Each structure stands twice: as structure tokens, then as C-alpha cells.
Image (tube, rainbow, N blue to C red):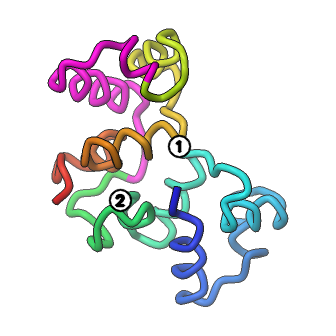
Amino acid sequence: MNYGESIKNIRERIGISQTQMAKILDIDKSLYGRYEKEKQTIPIKHLITICNYFMVSLDYIFNFNSIQQYKNTKKKINNTKAGKNLKEWRKSNKITQKELASILNTTQSVIADYERGRYLIATPFLYTICKKYNISADYLLGRTNEPKYLK
């Protein structure tokens, strides 16, 4: 997905060890190491914690752009807002839940659960949507209102 090297570089630039980062995330050091090597997918909640700690955007972590942080970035994710943004984006692109589920290799009920705000979208699904459709991950999650689309 292309976030492991980013979080490693930021962590090293700031001078924080993997052990310290694991403590910040309240996880085992070996699990954090697997996140950096992308041997295990990092959950959105941990990515947001990292973004907040280092004051960077999710788009920056995903290497979608070079903007480190957007103005008025919200630190907390509201599942309902994130679901609403996903649904609005999907509808504006005339994509059905079934079609999006097919693109992401999941079920329509999973997409419906995301859109209802029952769960936050999974990291690989968020990454795939943003990369394929050039939309900001921070926008989709409701962390920022601008930019909606990446350049």
C-alpha cells in the first residue's frame, strides 16, 4: 500500500524508536515492526494516531501528496461523518454499493456498514478508493473538508 516506509521515515526523522512508537499505539513492538514492513495491515485507528502524533495528513503517509498537514484537521474520526462522506462520494461517482463491493472484493453489506458508520473503512479499502479515484483519504474520513480531490 505504501505507508510503511513513510511512517518509518517520519519516526526516524523525529528520533523515536519502534519500541516508543509501539507504546504510543499500545501494541507490541513486533506488531509495529510488521506495520512498518507492511507485513501486516495497519488499522485506520493506528494510522490516525500516528498522523496526530507526527502532525501529518493521511494523504502524506499514503504518499498521495506532499502536504504534511491540512488546515483545520480534525484529530478524531467520526464514523458517521466518514460513512456519510463515503456514501456521498460513491453516489456522486454513480457507483452502487454492489459495484464498490466488487471493486474492493468484499460484500455489499460491508459497504453498507461503512456508510452507516457502524465501522471505519478498512485501510486497504480506503487506500484503494483514494488511489483509484484520486480522492483524499483525510477528506473521506472527515478529517478535513479540503482538499476533496488530490492533484
Q: Is residue 58 above or below residue 97?
A: below
Which residue is located at x 53 percent, y 89 percent? 13
Counting residues from the start of the chain, the first of labels 1 and 2 encountered is 2
Three-letter code, disc 1: Thr
Q: Between residue 46 and residue 111, name the one nearer to us.
A: 111
* Magenta residues, start to end: 75-102
Q: Which mark is residue 103?
A: none
- Residue 33 at x, y percent in the picture: 76, 67
Where residue 45 sits in the image (x, y, percent)? 56, 46
User: In the image shown, does 127 or 57 lie closer to the viewer?
Assistant: 127
Residue tagged 1: 123
Q: Percent from the top left, x then y, of residue 101? A: 45, 19
Q: Quadrant of residue 103?
A: top left
Q: Quadrant of residue 82?
A: top left
State the SS at label 2. helix
Residue at 69 percent of width and 67 percent of height: 37
Quarter-of-image position of residue 140: top left
Q: Front-most of 14 and 90?
A: 90
Q: Residues within 10 Å of mark 2 (few under 14, many from 20)?
A: many
How far across and down, in percent of the image, does residue 120 sit?
50, 32
Residue 133 shown in magenta: no
Residue that appears at 78% across and 75% down: 19
The image quadrant where one finds the C terminus is bottom left
The residue to which callout 2 is attached is: 59
* Residue 44 vertical placement versus 89 (above, below): below
Tell me the kind of residue under disc 2: Asp
Contact between labelled residues 2 and 1, with CB atoms less than 8 Å apart = no
Tell me which residue sits at (54%, 55%) in the image.
Answer: 47
User: Relative to residue 85, is residue 131 depicted above or below?
Assistant: below
The alpha-carbon separation of the residues under discs 1 and 2 comes to: 12 Å
